[in-house]
Image (cartoon, rainbow, N blue to C red):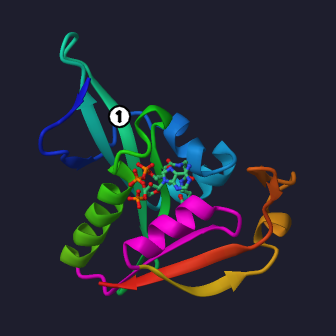
Amino acid sequence: MNLNNDRSVRKLKEHESIPYSLLLLADETKEAIDVYIKDSEIYVLEIENKISKENKIIGIYVLQSRDDNKIEIKNIAVDEKFQGQGIGTFLLKDAEVRSRKNGFKTIIIGTADAGIKQLYLYQKVGFEIFEVKKNFFIDNYPEPIYENGVLLKDRVMLKKVL
Ligand code: ACO
């Protein structure tokens, strides 16, 4: 399989099933995803299998407007087989360009305090930390969540002016 030459991202159509398996890479439970997914727009990146000609979604991001000026990336994920190839960076930039075109002034994103790779990636593309929601993962999830052996506690919020 090869990435489409233009790596174009498209909006998921209403009749298409929601790619929960990808969304669940970035969020703990389907229930947590369902809280925001209905009021959000889902964008996907596909590749074509050159032999079967079938498309497969390998990247995703979810946008939810917070007000007329501010939009949030609620979920971003890349199929594990395709991580580390620049696709996450590409999706973040795509979300940024799309949001700017749609008139938003600020884009925000939140991640766990122990999400070292995500924190690095978001800051590398220009996001800055503006808030730490203390004990967010302890207060809002029924079970303790561990990432790389570390108990998730706080949610770090980052923003970028568009
Ligand atoms: N540890 C540290 N850094 C790493 C690792 C790693 N294991 N793997 C890759 N990186 C670095 C890369 O080297 C790259 O930096 P560089 O350009 O300086 O080399 C940087 O991370 C970004 O790499 P990309 O290839 O652009 O990102 P990728 O396609 O892997 O996508 C993503 C990043 C979306 C976080 C992906 O890893 C993923 O789907 N993870 C699981 C889901 C997730 O955690 N999503 C975010 C949750 S928060 C939210 O959704 C709002």
Q: Please report the residue visible at 47 percent of the width from the left and 48 percent of the height from the top.
A: 77
Closest to the observer, 43 or 59: 59
Q: Which quadrant does the C terminus fall into?
A: bottom left
- In which quadrant is the N terminus drawn? top left
Residue 124 covered by magenta stretch: yes
In which image quadrant can residue 44 be found?
top left
Find residue 101 and report its image quarter: bottom left
- Residue drawn at x 74%, y 50% as measured from the top left: 148
Residue at the spot of label 1: 57
> What is the x, y in percent for residue 50?
18, 17
- Does the magenta segment cover residue 32? no
Which stretch is magenta? Answer: 103-126
Q: Nearer the viewer, residue 34 or 139?
A: 139
Where does the image place residue 28, in percent across and percent down from the top left?
69, 48
Residue ID at (58%, 44%): 25
Q: Residue 121, how many percent across, how many down?
A: 46, 65
Q: Nearer the viewer, residue 68 or 44?
A: 44
Q: Is residue 54 left or right of residue 143?
A: left
Relative to 104, does residue 79 appear above or below in the rendering? above
- Left-right relation of 112 to 105: right
Residue 132 drawn at (x, y percent)? 68, 83
Q: Residue at the location (85% across, 65% down)?
A: 138
46 in relation to 31, above or below: above
Respond yes or no on whether mark 1 lies under 8 Å from ligand 1. no
Residue 134 against residue 145 in the figure, above or below:
below
- Three-letter amino acid code at the position of disc 1: Ile
Q: How many marks?
A: 1
